């Protein structure tokens, strides 16, 4: 029986060394053969596309002349895969990962094929030293929570996934039509993607037996974006209006987010207790960003003056 076709969508920007390591890892450590990689070079200054064409000639490269953000960049790769490859599955990948299981794709596809209602399958992310980094999770009230306690190898039902290495069925992608570009340039588009799938009847699974090394957030950090907090407020407000209900929506929009603007944790790993918070030195600027995020037109003007496309 012929293997089903898998289109791997890989977005990259200004991370040439890590991208090269990622592609080498996929090629050497994937024992599933019927796949094609679609690389979207999102305006990299040092021309990742030229390196990829030379070292990995089987990879199809699409180059954008500027960084269009996460949603738009991925959607360009997804559309190209539809047009020239007609895949049965999509795999969404970061450019700063390393595959650890040779049978990672077979495992994820086995989960997806086990139940027609399973629409998306995710993996567990670990740090290069082997420590746990992130996984899927649930929406608990106004909190976007992560699943932290599980037995190795568990198959978990979740509401959302950290889209580092995620398998998506064709029919789910057909329905969702990729990522919502309203979240441009980045943040919460992956959570929104998963929740839209779940709200329309598909279940989402986290296969903890599949582990991917993730050199966390290197691509976003590489953007050197001084409008990070403004982007967070804009996208969080979109997310909250769309996916939260009643008092949870109101609390996140009008209490939680203003607190984020004013306070930050002294230690990220510690609990959410008052003694673990301190005043942000730039809280006045953050409050300003929070307020203009409610006005999309003003927000858009500010971002465009900063050279960021929305």
Image (cartoon, helix red, strand yellow):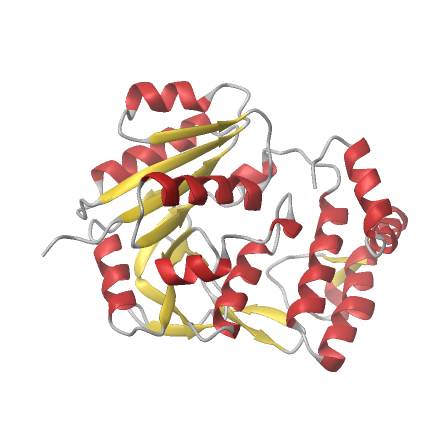
Q: Is residue 94 visible?
A: no
Relative horizontal placement of residue 117, taking residue 72 as reference (left or right): left
Could you tell me which residue is drawn at 60 percent across and 36 percent down?
Answer: 68
Residue 271 x/y as whole percent: 64, 68
Up-down: is 154 above or below 303? below
Could you tell me which residue is drawn at 67 percent across and 63 percent down?
Answer: 239
Relative horizontal placement of residue 146, taking residue 185 as reference (left or right): left
Residue 184 x/y as whole percent: 64, 46
Residue 51 x/y as whole percent: 38, 20
Check the image and name the residue furthest to the bottom.
246
Residue 10 placement: quadrant: top left
Q: Nearer the viewer, residue 51 or 72?
A: 72
Q: Nearer the viewer, residue 208 or 194?
A: 194
Could you tell me which residue is drawn at 30 percent across and 58 percent down?
Answer: 210
Quadrant assignment for the C terminus: top right
Q: Is residue 201 visible?
A: yes
Quadrant assignment for the N terminus: bottom left
Could you tell me which residue is drawn at 84 percent across and 57 percent down?
Answer: 294
């Amino acid at each position: 029986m012929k293997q089903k076709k898998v289109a791997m969508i890989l977005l990259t920007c200004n991370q040439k060394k890590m991208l090269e390591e990622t592609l080498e890892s996929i090629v050497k450590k994937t024992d599933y053969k019927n796949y094609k990689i679609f690389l979207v070079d999102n305006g990299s200054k040092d021309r990742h596309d030229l390196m990829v064409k030379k070292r990995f000639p089987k990879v199809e490269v699409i180059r954008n002349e500027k960084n269009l953000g996460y949603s738009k960049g991925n959607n360009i790769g997804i559309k190209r895969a539809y047009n020239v490859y007609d895949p049965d599955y999509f795999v969404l990948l970061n450019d700063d990962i390393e595959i650890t299981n040779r049978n990672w794709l077979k495992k994820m596809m086995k989960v997806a094929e086990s139940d027609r209602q399973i629409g998306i399958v995710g993996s567990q992310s670990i740090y290069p030293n082997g420590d746990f980094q992130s996984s899927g999770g649930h929406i608990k009230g106004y909190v976007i929570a992560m699943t932290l306690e599980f037995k190795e190898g568990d198959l978990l039902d979740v509401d959302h996934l950290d889209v580092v290495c995620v398998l998506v069925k064709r029919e789910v992608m057909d329905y969702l039509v990729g990522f919502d570009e309203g979240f441009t340039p980045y943040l919460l588009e992956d959570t929104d993607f998963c929740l839209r799938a779940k709200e329309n009847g598909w279940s989402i699974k986290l296969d903890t037996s599949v582990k991917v090394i993730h050199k966390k957030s290197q691509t976003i950090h590489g953007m050197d974006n001084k409008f990070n907090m403004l982007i967070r407020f804009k996208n969080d407000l979109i997310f909250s209006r769309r996916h939260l209900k009643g008092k949870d929506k109101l609390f996140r929009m009008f209490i939680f987010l203003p607190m984020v603007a004013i306070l930050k944790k002294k230690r990220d790993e510690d609990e959410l207790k008052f003694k673990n918070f301190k005043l942000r030195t730039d809280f006045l600027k953050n409050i300003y960003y929070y307020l203009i995020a409610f006005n999309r037109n003003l927000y858009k003007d500010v971002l465009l003056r900063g050279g960021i496309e929305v």
